[in-house]
Amino acid sequence: MNKYELAGQQLLKEHVVSVKTIRHNMSGIAYIDDRAISAPVPRRPLSFAVFAHEVGHIVNGRISPRWREELMAWQFSIAQFKRFGFSVPKEVKTRMKYSLAFALAKALNRRMAKVPKGLRIYKKYLSPVTYIYGDDHREQKWHADYWKATHI
């Protein structure tokens, strides 16, 4: 086991979390009621970030609004890097930016009235998209722009 796997095992043990399924991509799911996660094996920084993020969902529980739950799970994940003495590489920071921009876009598309202070920095990673429906009805929505998240 490498240092990321050992840290992941320690997180599971400390927070009484089990692994439901191992994912082979860089995404995860937290089953809060079951205290279980589906996540990649934490072998490298990005997989550790995703793994710790899902554990963060379990530790924090359900939080409303949903964007705050995502923000707190990412804060938990980054705190684990610092706790275990790991550096936070650019790929992890980019993933966090994109993920939080996505959460902001969803909240804005659901008519969030005001962008909260904690999410304002992620607005620059959004692009407006206009949906045109069959009856020529148009609707503007926000889209988390991966290019912006990786280049700005």
Image (cartoon, rainbow, N blue to C red):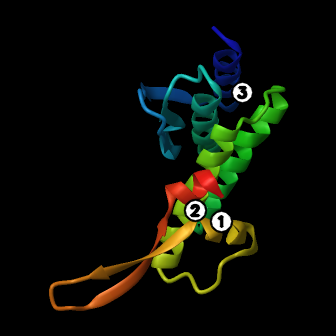
Tag 3 secondary structure? helix
Q: Which of marks 1 and 3 is in front?
A: 1
Tag 1 secondary structure? helix
Q: Mark 3 points at which residue?
A: 14
In the image, residue 138 sits, relative to residue 101, either above or below, namely below
Q: Mark yes or no: residue 116 visible.
A: yes
Locate the N terminus by quadrant. top right
Query: What crowding class fits label 3: few (fewer than 14 Cα within 10 Å), some (14-19), or many (20 or more)?
Result: few
Tag 2 secondary structure? helix
Give the residue type at disc 3.
Answer: Glu
Mark 2 to mark 3: distance in Å?
30 Å
Tally the numbered discs.
Answer: 3
Q: Position of residue 62 (x, y in %)?
A: 58, 56
In the image, residue 103 sits, relative to residue 90, either above or below, namely below
Locate the C terminus by quadrant. bottom right
Give the residue type at disc 2.
Answer: Ala
Q: Name the residue under label 2.
A: 101
Q: Position of residue 133 (x, y in %)?
A: 21, 83
Residue 106 vs residue 51: left or right?
Answer: left
